[in-house]
């Protein structure tokens, strides 16, 4: 029997790049007689703290500039929304940005000329911030659900828009999980876990500034009426460079005939290093065009045959690494008792992106006033996510294409008309593992869009849509975070031989732990060559 006085537990920590060493010593008057070392591995946990869906109705008064004629009727409206600022203020997150309206209208003058108004209007929304949480990264997706423009009078319009926001609060937390328990005559049991660990969340801004030449034979510009842009062919190269194409379409009034309209299409290559300095095995990137300015520019002869494009692209990225980690779930010693401190944690076991390209073809009926559709002047197409549904086998994406179109009808395009239309679609994406519970984050982008005259009254569109779904699968595990309660055990004289008959649920580990011997000793004493779990009623020899 041992007699101890003035005993204490001393704890020390040591760190290196990949591990943390935790040493607990049992101290007596005669010095240290036992030591247990817990080697812990830092695990970065990605947690979705909260997700909020908001829809806000905004009303904007649009004043016709003094240089423009009165409005007779509105032909079509293209509306986009951008998020500019996210700022925590007390218990709320203030999210603000701009709505951009491009209104094409028929003027109330003798010529009934086609005119345009471009207006930026600020908006802001207050969202609840998770209580008691700090160091949270906020991800915001925005979209315009609908815009309705009414004529108040010839000099004023009223635009009502529904802005839809998806706000996610993400936290990265580090848990120091026990990977190995070391000490004299200490035995442990560990489980292998395949964990997808988040390494970093960040964003970068890509600035584009180009001066582009009109195609040969195109007349010079008097005024740009409408412009639309989209990012396509997005990819990340091996050297962490984001590459894409900024496709821009403009509609302008030529300086040689103010009654006519011209369109032009440009493609600008985009390349930006993300400058990532962290290890990762998977990279998820979402991009959004934050600002776009398109203005006519003079050539060497002073003619406006060039177009200056300035754009700002925001790219948000999340880095993941995948590791096979052995984590301790139980341990014991032959000569002393100790207790493992444990805590439940939710870890990500899978993070991946699935992208499927879908071809959407549709014929859109247009109001032609009893005349034939003669020419398509300009088309803008934007994707919109309507709803997401999922079951044990797949994800169903319901979306639509918002189509902005200007077109001419009648002989010699006597009348210019406009329309805003929707093309709805549904696409199902199969899950990589059925009956698994996934968190789903969808996104829709347009890779390419083309159009033609399908009939005397129909616009034909052919659109290549990329449906991207980020899948995240979580699992809860218990991890060892510390060691406590180290104390010696009273030595008893055991018989030289114990014959043990196994019970239901017995394992080699449970038997070895109960009798404080190693599994290897049980195997040696019983002539076992492999660690095969015993059957109920099996005779096991325990030799002292």
Image (cartoon, grey):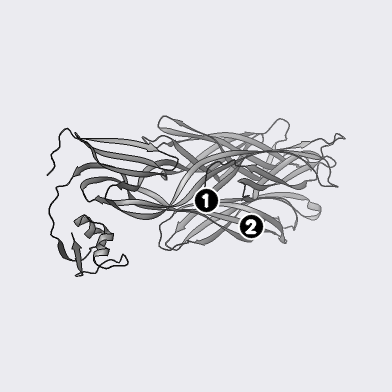
Judge from the rendering whether residue 318 lies leftward or rightward of residue 367; answer left or right.
left
Identify the residue at image location x=66%, y=41%. Answer: 103
Residue at x 50% of width, y 54% of height: 352
The residue that mark 2 highlights is 464
Q: Is residue 387 above or below residue 171?
A: below
- Other residues around mark 1 within 10 Å, as few (<14) / some (14–19) / many (≥20): few
> Closer to the camera, 208 or 358?
208
Residue 207 occupies quadrant: top right
- Left or right, 464 with respect to 336, comes to right
Q: Position of residue 416 (x, y in %)?
A: 74, 49
Front one among 314 and 77: 314
Residue 500, percent from left and from top:
17, 65
Inspect this view and state whether residue 392 appears.
Answer: yes
Taking the image as shown, residue 255 lies to the left or right of residue 400, namely: right
The reply to whether discs 1 and 2 touch (Cβ–Cβ < 8 Å) is no
Secondary element at image label 2: strand
Which residue is tagged 1?
A: 281
Relative vertical location of residue 468 with respect to residue 117 in this rendering, above or below: below
- Asked if residue 507 can be seen in this view, the reply is no
Which one is in front, 520 or 343? 520
On-image quarter of the C terminus:
bottom left
Residue at 51 percent of width and 62 percent of height? 428
Whole-percent x and y of residue 48?
42, 45
| Distance between the alpha carbons at the discs numbered 1 and 2 | 28 Å
**Callout 2 crowding tier (Cα within 10 Å): few <14, some 14–19, many ≥20:** some
Q: Position of residue 319 (x, y in %)?
A: 51, 46
Element under disc 1: loop
Instruction: Look at the image and tell me in which quarter the N terminus lies.
Output: top left
Q: Above or below — where is 365 with respect to 40?
A: below
């Amino acid at each position: 029997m041992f007699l101890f006085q003035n005993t204490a537990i001393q704890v020390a920590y040591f760190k290196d790049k990949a591990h943390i060493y935790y040493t607990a010593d049992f101290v007596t008057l005669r010095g240290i007689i036992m030591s247990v070392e817990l080697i812990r591995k830092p695990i970065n946990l990605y947690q979705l703290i909260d997700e909020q869906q908001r829809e806000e109705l905004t009303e904007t008064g649009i004043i016709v500039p003094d240089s423009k004629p009165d409005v007779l009727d509105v032909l079509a409206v293209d509306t986009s929304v951008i998020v500019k600022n996210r700022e925590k203020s007390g218990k709320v997150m203030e999210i603000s940005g701009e709505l951009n309206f491009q209104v094409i209208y028929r003027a109330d003058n003798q010529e009934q000329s086609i005119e345009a108004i471009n207006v930026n209007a600020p908006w802001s929304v207050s969202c609840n911030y998770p209580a008691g949480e700090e160091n949270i990264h906020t991800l915001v997706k925005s979209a315009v659900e609908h815009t309705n423009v009414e004529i108040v009078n010839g000099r004023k319009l009223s635009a009502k828009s529904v802005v839809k926001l998806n706000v996610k609060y993400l936290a990265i937390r580090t848990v120091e999980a026990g990977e190995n328990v070391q000490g004299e005559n200490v035995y442990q049991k560990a489980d292998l876990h395949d964990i997808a660990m988040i390494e970093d969340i960040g964003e970068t801004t890509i600035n584009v500034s180009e001066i582009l030449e009109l195609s040969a034979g195109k007349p010079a510009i008097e005024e740009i009426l409408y412009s639309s842009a989209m990012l396509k062919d997005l990819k990340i190269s091996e050297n962490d460079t984001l590459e894409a194409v900024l496709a821009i379409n403009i509609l302008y009034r030529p300086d040689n005939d103010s009654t006519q309209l011209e369109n032009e299409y440009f493609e600008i290559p985009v390349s930006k290093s993300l400058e990532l300095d962290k290890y990762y095995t998977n990279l998820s990137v979402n991009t959004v065009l934050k600002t776009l300015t398109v203005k006519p520019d003079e050539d060497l002869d002073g003619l406006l045959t060039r177009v200056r494009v300035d754009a700002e692209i925001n790219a948000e990225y999340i880095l993941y690494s995948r590791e096979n980690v052995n984590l301790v779930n139980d341990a014991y010693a032959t000569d002393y008792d100790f207790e493992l401190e444990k805590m439940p944690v939710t870890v990500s076991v899978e993070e991946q992106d699935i992208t499927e390209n879908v071809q959407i073809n549709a014929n859109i009926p247009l109001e032609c006033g009893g005349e034939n559709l003669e020419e398509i002047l300009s088309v803008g197409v934007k994707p919109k996510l309507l709803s997401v549904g999922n079951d044990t086998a797949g994800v169903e994406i319901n979306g639509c294409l918002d189509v902005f179109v200007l077109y001419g009808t009648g002989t010699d395009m006597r009348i210019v008309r406009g329309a805003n239309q929707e093309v709805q679609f549904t696409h199902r994406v199969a899950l990589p593992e059925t009956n698994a519970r996934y968190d789903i984050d969808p996104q829709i982008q347009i890779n390419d869009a083309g159009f033609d005259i399908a009939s005397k009254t129909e616009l034909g569109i052919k659109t290549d849509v990329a449906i991207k779904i980020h899948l995240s699968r979580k699992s809860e595990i218990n991890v060892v975070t510390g060691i406590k309660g180290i104390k010696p055990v009273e030595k008893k004289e055991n018989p030289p031989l114990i014959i043990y008959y196994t019970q239901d649920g017995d394992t080699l580990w449970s038997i070895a732990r109960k009798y404080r011997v190693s599994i290897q000793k049980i195997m040696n004493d019983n002539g076992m060559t492999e660690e095969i779990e015993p059957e109920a009623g099996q005779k096991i020899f325990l030799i002292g």
